[in-house]
Amino acid sequence: MLFFALGLVMGYFINKILQPKEESLVLKPIAVVDKVIPFEEKKEAPLPPVEVLKVDNEGMKKNYYLQLGAFKYPYFSDRLISKVKKLGYTVHVHKIQRKNDELTVVEVGPFKKKEQALKHRFVIADKIGTEGKILFKSRIE
């Protein structure tokens, strides 16, 4: 009961202090302006034309790739890339943007047949301990 009464009293004084006085609500003009100065917008330089790359289905080659990993820190992707290159494989690296960070994806290939990709998957797993994931995708050649 005591806390309730104390809350009422505090609420009354807070409202009394925070309420603006009526005389502060009256707006008084500072000066009269008889000349209007127009606002000028900054004009940005036009963007250069964008070159659109058009590729027909014949330009797209579908092959198998081994995705060996996707890394947040470049140290780990660089280490894997150097190990795979020492084995003599062609390494493809690309970036994937996520909400707060970027991943570096390391892939090996291309392989014409899934059996080839599977064979090399086991060879790489045996040599460096990373078992890749087989992907079937298109790349512009």
Image (cartoon, helix red, strand yellow):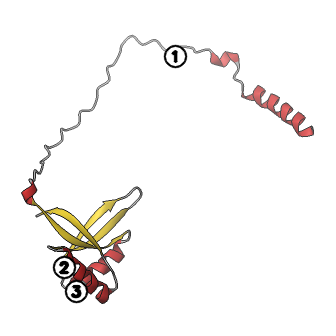
The answer to which of marks 2 and 3 sits earlier in the sequence is 3
Q: At x 10% / y 55%, what residue is drawn?
A: 57
Q: Of circles 1 and 3, which is in front?
A: 3
- The residue tagged 2 is 116
Q: Residue furthest bottom?
A: 127
**Residue bearing the label numbered 1:** 30
Report x, y in % for residue 64.
20, 70
Residue 129, picture quadrant: bottom left
Residue situated in front as seen by the camera: 66 or 41: 66
Q: Nearer the viewer, mark 2 or mark 1?
A: 2
What is the CA distance from the residue labelled 2 to the residue labelled 1? 83 Å
Drawn side of residue 129 relative to residue 59, left or right? right
Q: Quadrant of residue 135?
A: bottom left
Up-down: is 85 above or below 112? Answer: below
**SS type, badge 1:** loop
In the picture, which quadrant includes the N terminus?
Answer: top right
Marks 1 and 3 close (CB-CB < 8 Å)? no
**Amino acid type indicated by mark 3:** Lys
SS under mark 3: helix
Instruction: Residue at 30% x, 80% y: name it.
Output: 80
